[in-house]
Amino acid sequence: MRFFFLVAGGSFLLSFSAKLLSDELLKRRIPLAGSFLGLQPSKNSGIAFGIRLPPVLQEVLILIALVLVFVLAWRSGRSRWSQVGFGLIFGGALGNIVDRLRDGYVTDFFQVGTFPIFNLADSCITIGVAILLVEMMLHQRNKRGISNF
């Protein structure tokens, strides 16, 4: 679980620091590649993709999800890759939760095309899920005895 805590702490610190910098420095959109890519401040009071749920239900579901990630990490976090994946998910989620508790919303700032604006914590969560999916597929492949490419 050592890697889990290191990665979770690192992803939390990076994502929350990015939110604080965004709050202080990003007052209007900064184009990085024309209208396609930029840094754009946005306040997200919902969950993923700005979906809104009733306030109490939303907070309860977020808390349940965080506890579930920790329990899953504790039970299945044998490999370093699963510890890294779960650590990224937990640290990113914790960064979003602390930001929500502080402001009442989550600060988003990455704008890519027409995709919903997101933040570094969201990226950590997405990368963590991708790592776990790849690990799961490789485990299933090895379990069935399928040879390498």
Image (spheres, helix red, strand yellow):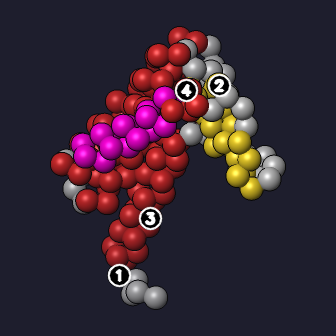
Q: Amino acid at mark 4?
A: Glu
Q: Residue 140: where, in percent of width, then height? A: 39, 69
Whether residue 109 is visible:
yes
Residue assigned mark 4? 24
Above-or-below relation of 28 to 35: above
Q: Residue 105: where, in percent of width, then height? A: 57, 20
In 3D space, how far apart are the residues under numbered discs 4 and 1 (Cα atoms)?
Answer: 53 Å
The picture quadrant where one finds residue 94 is top left
Above-or-below relation of 139 to 83: below
Residue assigned mark 1? 145
Q: Secondary structure at mark 3?
A: helix
Q: Secondary structure at mark 1?
A: loop
From the image, give the main secondary structure of the stretch colored magenta: helix
Q: Is 36 displayed left or right of 81 in the figure?
A: right
Residue sitting at 58 percent across and 12 percent down? 55
Camera-side residue: 3 or 21? 21
Residue 123 painted magenta: no
> Residue 134, labelled with which disc?
3
Q: Which residues are magenta?
A: 5-20
Category of crowding for the residue at label 1, using alpha-carbon neighbours closer than 10 angstroms: few (below 14), some (14–19), many (at least 20): few
Q: Residue furthest left?
A: 2
Above-or-below relation of 89 to 50: below
Q: Earlier in the sequence, mark 1 or mark 2?
A: 2
Q: Is 6 displayed left or right of 13 in the figure?
A: left
Residue assigned mark 2? 43
Q: Earlier in the sequence, mark 3 or mark 1?
A: 3
Q: Secondary structure at mark 2?
A: strand
